[in-house]
Amino acid sequence: MDYGMIGKIEKAKRYAEQPERITFLSLTVDFKGDNNAYRINLGPEGWDCSCPGFRTHGICPHVMTLEKEFRAMIKRSPLPYAPGQNVVSDVEKAMRYATEPDRLQFKAFEVQFDGDNSPHHTTFNEDGWQCDCSFFASRGVCCHTMAMERILKGMIASKEAVVG
């Protein structure tokens, strides 16, 4: 029996139950809207969405959905509503979208975990997972990657799907 792995699985579960310990530093998400698919990015410069509403108002229901669903992990103020934005419709859409996680496909992200002993950086992209912790270096998996898989269940492209 691999007691080291058992401990990491337990830690992953605890981290997933404490999302405030995780900070999205960047992300790229494909979002299936009601009529079209859009690409959402979050980076140091802020949000971007390929939808027309974001282009016009600098905010949209797609970004609002991510802000709502991952509030504990997105350590920035929500985007303000914009003049001319159909706020009621966008809020209603965002609330509905938040109950439909199959609309989201995380293509890439970087997070920081405030670990028990020190912070750790974990990334996911077309090359798969990476983490700066020693357990990942020896096993190719760790409590940080397992916690993100648990939190984003069904919303992360499998490595096979990303590469294939």
Image (tube, rainbow, N blue to C red):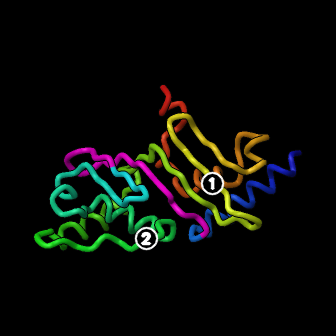
Give the SS element for disc 2: loop
- Residue 75 shown left or right of residue 2 in the figure: left
List the residue tagged with mark 2: 76
Q: Is residue 99 visible?
A: no
Mark 1 to mark 2 CA distance (whole Å): 18 Å
Predominant SS of the magenta segment: strand
Highlighted range, magenta: 21-39
Judge whether 28 appears above or below 65 on screen. above
Judge whether 158 appears above or below 88 on screen. above
Toward the viewer: 162 or 79?
A: 79
Of the residues shown, which amino acid type is indicated by label 1? Answer: His
Residue 163 is one of the magenta-drawn residues: no
- Which residue shows up at 42% across the image and 65% down it? 69
Q: Earlier in the sequence, mark 1 or mark 2?
A: 2
Q: Which mark is residue 39?
A: none
The N terminus lies in which quarter of the figure? Answer: top right
